[in-house]
Image: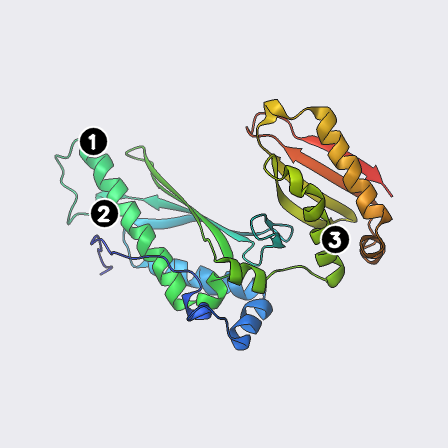
Amino acid sequence: MKKTNYYIIGIIVLLLVTLCGSGSISKEDINKVKNISYDDIVISLSNIINNFLYEYDYYTVSNLEFVEDKLAIDNTNEVKKFNNIKILLDIEVDLEKDSNDLKKDMTMAEKYKFFNELAKNTNKDLLDILHKESPIAYSKVGRVETSYIDTKNKLKYSSNINNSRDSQTMITLRNEESEGEKLILEAIFDYIRECKENYELKRFGTDNNKLIIEFDLYTVDDIHNQEIEKTSNGLFELIMENENTNRYIEEQEVKSIKVIFNKETNDMEPIIFEKEI
C-alpha cells in the first residue's frame, strides 16, 4: 500500500542551512559544492524525486528535466551564479485513486480546492525532502518549476520557487570559470553602474566562441534605442581595449561579442548588437 499524506507541514525552506551554520561556510562544504558534478546532481535529486512520488498512488511523473545555465548572473551580488540549475517537473494526478479523502459527490469548486491543497502540501514536502536528503546537490538548484495536472478533471496547480541565498554565500561560491572572466565581469558592472536601475545583467560568458552579455530591460518606454546602442558600443570598446579583458577574449578564442537587451514582455523582440573580433 502506498501512503496517503495530506497534513500541512509548517516548514521554512532554509536553503544551505547545513552549509552556512552560524553565517560562515566551512572550507570542506565549499569544496563539496564546488566539486559536485552536474551528473551527480541529476542522479541524486532524480532518485529523491522519483522515490518520493512513487509512494503516492495518484501521482505519476510525466516529465523531469534539469537545465543548467552556466552563463547565469546574480545581478544583486554581481557574480556568476553557483546555483545555476533549474528543475522542471510535471506530475500527472489521478484524484480517483485518492479514495480516502475524495468524496464522490464533490462539486467542481470543492474538487478544485481539494486539488490545490493536495498539490501545495505535496510540493512543500518534496522541497523539504530534497533539502534534507541531499543538501549539497540541492544547493546548486536556483529554481524549481512544478506542475500538477489532473487531465480528467481539467485541474492544474503550478509552483515556481526561487531558491534565494544570502549575499555571503553567493559571493563565497561565485562561479566564474577563471580570474579573467571575473575581471571582465567586474569591469562590466562598473561600466553599467550608473544606469543599473534601467537594466539587469542576466547572463554573461562564452558560448560557441561568442561572448554573450545579456540584459533584461526595464522601463522600456524611457530607454531609447540610441541609448541602448551607445551602451553596447561602450561595452565593445571596454572589452577590446582593456588588457585583462582582451587576454580573456584570446584565452576563450572568442570570435564575436553579442550584446542582448530583452524587453519587459515576452511578445517584444530583444534588441541585439553583435560585433565580430
- What residue lies at 48% left-to-right and 70% top-to-bottom? 24
- What residue lies at 48% left-to-right and 57% top-to-bottom? 165
Q: Are marks 1 and 2 in contact (CB under 8 Å)?
A: no
Kind of residue sitting beneath label 2:
Lys
Which of 128 and 262 lies nearest the eye of the viewer? 262
Q: Which residue is mark 3?
A: 184
Q: Earlier in the sequence, mark 3 or mark 1?
A: 1
Instruction: Kindly report the distance in space between the C-alpha atoms of the residues bearing marks 1 and 2.
Output: 19 Å
Residue 245 locus on image (x, y percent): 80, 53
Which of 276 and 77 lies nearest the eye of the viewer? 77
- What residue lies at 46% left-to-right and 60% top-to-bottom? 46
Q: Is residue 193 left or right of residue 101?
A: right
Mark 3, secondary structure of its residue: helix
- Quadrant for the N terminus in the image: bottom left
Q: How many marks?
A: 3
Residue 98 locus on image (x, y percent): 21, 48
Kind of residue sitting beneath label 3:
Ile
- Quadrant for the C terminus in the image: top right
Q: Earlier in the sequence, mark 1 or mark 2?
A: 2
- Alpha-carbon neighbours of circle 1 within 10 Å: few (<14), some, or many (≥20)? few
Residue 109 occupies which quadrant of the picture?
top left
Q: Is residue 204 left or right of residue 106?
A: right
Q: Which residue is mark 1?
A: 109
- Alpha-carbon neighbours of circle 2 within 10 Å: few (<14), some, or many (≥20)? few
Residue 96 occupies which quadrant of the picture?
top left
Q: Which residue is mark 2?
A: 97
Q: Earlier in the sequence, mark 3 or mark 2?
A: 2
Mark 3 or 1: in front is 3
Instruction: Kindly report the distance in space between the C-alpha atoms of the residues bearing marks 3 and 1.
Output: 55 Å
Kind of residue sitting beneath label 1:
Ala
